Amino acid sequence: TGNAAPAPDRAEPRLIALVDLAAQRLLLADEVAAAKYGTDSPIEDPAREREVLDTVAELSTEAGLDPADGVRFFRDQIEAGKDVQRGLFAEWDAHPELRPGHRPDLGAEVRPELDRISAEAVRELRETEVVREPTDECRLDLAASAVTAVFGHRLDALHRDALTAAAGKICG
Ligand SMILES: C=C(O[C@@H]1C=C(C(=O)O)C=C[C@H]1O)C(=O)O
Protein backbone atom coordinates (compact mmCIF):
# COMPACT_ATOMS: atom_id res chain seq x y z
CA THR A 1 0.00 0.00 0.00
CA GLY A 2 2.13 2.79 -1.32
CA ASN A 3 5.31 1.32 0.12
CA ALA A 4 6.88 0.44 -3.19
CA ALA A 5 10.13 2.25 -3.85
CA PRO A 6 9.65 4.89 -6.51
CA ALA A 7 10.75 3.61 -9.88
CA PRO A 8 13.73 5.62 -11.10
CA ASP A 9 12.29 7.41 -14.11
CA ARG A 10 15.23 9.68 -14.82
CA ALA A 11 18.49 8.65 -16.38
CA GLU A 12 20.30 11.47 -14.66
CA PRO A 13 21.47 9.85 -11.40
CA ARG A 14 23.19 7.06 -13.32
CA LEU A 15 24.66 9.31 -15.95
CA ILE A 16 25.99 11.60 -13.22
CA ALA A 17 28.13 8.71 -11.94
CA LEU A 18 29.41 7.83 -15.41
CA VAL A 19 30.22 11.42 -16.36
CA ASP A 20 31.86 11.97 -12.97
CA LEU A 21 34.18 9.03 -13.66
CA ALA A 22 35.04 10.55 -17.04
CA ALA A 23 35.86 13.82 -15.25
CA GLN A 24 37.97 12.00 -12.63
CA ARG A 25 39.91 10.28 -15.40
CA LEU A 26 40.55 13.64 -17.11
CA LEU A 27 41.76 15.17 -13.85
CA LEU A 28 44.20 12.26 -13.56
CA ALA A 29 45.58 13.30 -16.95
CA ASP A 30 47.20 16.16 -15.00
CA GLU A 31 49.17 13.56 -13.04
CA VAL A 32 49.99 11.70 -16.25
CA ALA A 33 51.27 14.95 -17.78
CA ALA A 34 53.28 15.75 -14.65
CA ALA A 35 54.82 12.27 -14.79
CA LYS A 36 55.84 12.70 -18.43
CA TYR A 37 56.78 16.37 -18.67
CA GLY A 38 60.50 16.86 -19.12
CA THR A 39 61.10 13.13 -19.61
CA ASP A 40 61.46 10.90 -22.67
CA SER A 41 57.97 9.43 -22.13
CA PRO A 42 55.71 10.68 -24.94
CA ILE A 43 52.10 11.81 -24.36
CA GLU A 44 50.96 9.16 -26.81
CA ASP A 45 51.79 5.54 -25.86
CA PRO A 46 50.07 3.18 -28.33
CA ALA A 47 51.17 0.01 -26.48
CA ARG A 48 49.62 1.23 -23.23
CA GLU A 49 46.45 2.32 -25.10
CA ARG A 50 46.18 -1.19 -26.56
CA GLU A 51 46.53 -2.61 -23.04
CA VAL A 52 43.83 -0.29 -21.66
CA LEU A 53 41.42 -1.17 -24.47
CA ASP A 54 42.12 -4.92 -24.16
CA THR A 55 41.41 -4.75 -20.42
CA VAL A 56 38.23 -2.76 -21.06
CA ALA A 57 37.07 -5.36 -23.59
CA GLU A 58 37.68 -8.16 -21.06
CA LEU A 59 35.97 -6.32 -18.19
CA SER A 60 33.05 -5.49 -20.47
CA THR A 61 32.52 -9.11 -21.42
CA GLU A 62 32.66 -10.12 -17.74
CA ALA A 63 30.11 -7.43 -16.87
CA GLY A 64 27.71 -8.41 -19.64
CA LEU A 65 28.39 -5.26 -21.65
CA ASP A 66 29.06 -5.37 -25.38
CA PRO A 67 32.87 -5.02 -25.50
CA ALA A 68 32.52 -2.83 -28.61
CA ASP A 69 30.44 -0.42 -26.50
CA GLY A 70 33.13 -0.33 -23.78
CA VAL A 71 35.97 0.09 -26.27
CA ARG A 72 34.13 2.88 -28.16
CA PHE A 73 33.64 4.83 -24.93
CA PHE A 74 37.26 4.36 -23.89
CA ARG A 75 38.72 5.45 -27.21
CA ASP A 76 37.07 8.81 -26.51
CA GLN A 77 38.35 8.85 -22.90
CA ILE A 78 41.91 8.22 -24.11
CA GLU A 79 41.75 10.90 -26.83
CA ALA A 80 40.33 13.44 -24.37
CA GLY A 81 43.04 12.57 -21.84
CA LYS A 82 45.73 13.24 -24.45
CA ASP A 83 44.07 16.60 -25.25
CA VAL A 84 44.47 17.53 -21.57
CA GLN A 85 48.10 16.38 -21.54
CA ARG A 86 48.88 18.41 -24.70
CA GLY A 87 47.14 21.46 -23.25
CA LEU A 88 49.13 21.25 -20.03
CA PHE A 89 52.45 20.71 -21.85
CA ALA A 90 51.75 23.87 -23.89
CA GLU A 91 50.86 25.80 -20.74
CA TRP A 92 53.99 24.61 -18.93
CA ASP A 93 56.20 25.40 -21.94
CA ALA A 94 54.80 28.93 -22.04
CA HIS A 95 54.71 29.49 -18.26
CA PRO A 96 57.61 27.75 -16.51
CA GLU A 97 56.34 29.02 -13.15
CA LEU A 98 53.25 26.80 -13.58
CA ARG A 99 55.26 23.60 -14.09
CA PRO A 100 54.49 20.85 -11.59
CA GLY A 101 56.74 20.77 -8.56
CA HIS A 102 56.97 17.02 -8.40
CA ARG A 103 56.99 14.13 -10.86
CA PRO A 104 54.62 11.28 -9.95
CA ASP A 105 55.58 7.73 -10.91
CA LEU A 106 53.45 6.85 -13.95
CA GLY A 107 53.60 3.07 -13.57
CA ALA A 108 53.50 2.82 -9.79
CA GLU A 109 51.09 5.64 -8.92
CA VAL A 110 49.12 7.04 -11.82
CA ARG A 111 48.26 4.12 -14.08
CA PRO A 112 46.86 2.00 -11.21
CA GLU A 113 44.47 4.88 -10.44
CA LEU A 114 43.46 5.10 -14.10
CA ASP A 115 42.83 1.34 -14.09
CA ARG A 116 40.65 1.63 -10.98
CA ILE A 117 38.52 4.37 -12.58
CA SER A 118 38.33 2.44 -15.84
CA ALA A 119 36.97 -0.64 -14.09
CA GLU A 120 34.34 1.47 -12.33
CA ALA A 121 33.40 3.14 -15.60
CA VAL A 122 32.83 -0.25 -17.26
CA ARG A 123 30.40 -1.10 -14.44
CA GLU A 124 28.61 2.23 -14.92
CA LEU A 125 28.44 1.69 -18.67
CA ARG A 126 26.69 -1.60 -17.95
CA GLU A 127 24.35 0.04 -15.41
CA THR A 128 23.44 2.85 -17.80
CA GLU A 129 22.96 0.69 -20.86
CA VAL A 130 19.18 1.16 -20.99
CA VAL A 131 19.31 4.93 -20.47
CA ARG A 132 22.12 5.53 -22.98
CA GLU A 133 19.80 5.70 -25.95
CA PRO A 134 19.74 8.50 -28.52
CA THR A 135 16.78 10.23 -26.89
CA ASP A 136 16.10 13.81 -25.80
CA GLU A 137 15.87 12.57 -22.22
CA CYS A 138 19.36 11.10 -22.37
CA ARG A 139 20.76 14.26 -23.93
CA LEU A 140 19.13 16.46 -21.27
CA ASP A 141 20.37 14.22 -18.48
CA LEU A 142 23.83 14.13 -20.04
CA ALA A 143 23.93 17.92 -20.16
CA ALA A 144 22.85 18.11 -16.50
CA SER A 145 25.45 15.50 -15.56
CA ALA A 146 28.19 17.44 -17.34
CA VAL A 147 27.20 20.65 -15.52
CA THR A 148 27.31 18.74 -12.23
CA ALA A 149 30.84 17.48 -12.99
CA VAL A 150 32.07 20.88 -14.21
CA PHE A 151 30.94 22.61 -11.02
CA GLY A 152 31.66 19.71 -8.66
CA HIS A 153 35.27 19.46 -9.84
CA ARG A 154 35.63 23.17 -10.74
CA LEU A 155 36.83 22.20 -14.20
CA ASP A 156 38.74 24.83 -16.16
CA ALA A 157 38.24 25.40 -19.90
CA LEU A 158 40.82 22.75 -20.87
CA HIS A 159 39.14 20.05 -18.81
CA ARG A 160 35.62 21.24 -19.72
CA ASP A 161 36.36 20.92 -23.42
CA ALA A 162 37.95 17.52 -22.85
CA LEU A 163 34.89 16.37 -20.89
CA THR A 164 32.63 17.52 -23.71
CA ALA A 165 34.64 15.33 -26.09
CA ALA A 166 34.85 12.40 -23.65
CA ALA A 167 31.11 12.35 -22.91
CA GLY A 168 29.82 13.46 -26.30
CA LYS A 169 28.73 10.04 -27.55
CA ILE A 170 27.21 8.71 -24.31
CA CYS A 171 23.64 8.96 -25.65
CA GLY A 172 23.89 6.41 -28.42
C1 LIG B 1 47.27 8.22 -19.83
C2 LIG B 1 48.33 8.00 -20.59
O1 LIG B 1 48.59 8.72 -21.79
C3 LIG B 1 47.94 8.34 -22.98
C4 LIG B 1 46.52 8.06 -22.69
C5 LIG B 1 46.14 6.80 -22.25
C6 LIG B 1 44.86 6.61 -21.49
O2 LIG B 1 44.08 7.55 -21.40
O3 LIG B 1 44.66 5.51 -20.92
C7 LIG B 1 46.99 5.71 -22.51
C8 LIG B 1 48.18 5.86 -23.13
C9 LIG B 1 48.67 7.16 -23.63
O4 LIG B 1 48.53 7.22 -25.04
C10 LIG B 1 49.36 7.01 -20.19
O5 LIG B 1 50.42 6.99 -20.83
O6 LIG B 1 49.12 6.27 -19.23
Image: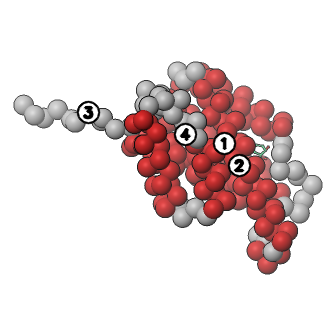
The image shows residue 27 at horizontal and vertical percentages of 63, 56
Residue 119, given in percent of the width and then of the height, sits at 59, 37
**Amino acid type at mark 3:** Ala
Q: Earlier in the sequence, mark 3 or mark 4?
A: 3
Relative to 27, does residue 77 appear above or below in the rendering?
above
Question: What is the crowding at mark 1: few (fewer than 14 residues within 10 Å), some, or many (at least 20)?
Answer: many
Tell which quarter ligand 1 is in.
top right
Q: CA distance from mark 4 to mark 1?
A: 14 Å
In the rendered structure, the answer to whether residue 124 lies left or right of residue 42 reads: left
Name which residue type carries label 2.
Gly
Query: Which disc number belongs to residue 120?
Result: 4
At x 7%, y 31%, the residue is 1
Residue on which disc 3 sits: 7
The residue that mark 2 highlights is 81
* Mark in the foreground, 4 or 1: 1
Please provide percent x and percent y for residue 7: 26, 33
Q: Secondary structure at mark 4?
A: helix
- Mark 2 vs 3, N-terminal side: 3
* 4 or 2: tag closer to the N-terminus: 2
Circle on res. 77 = 1
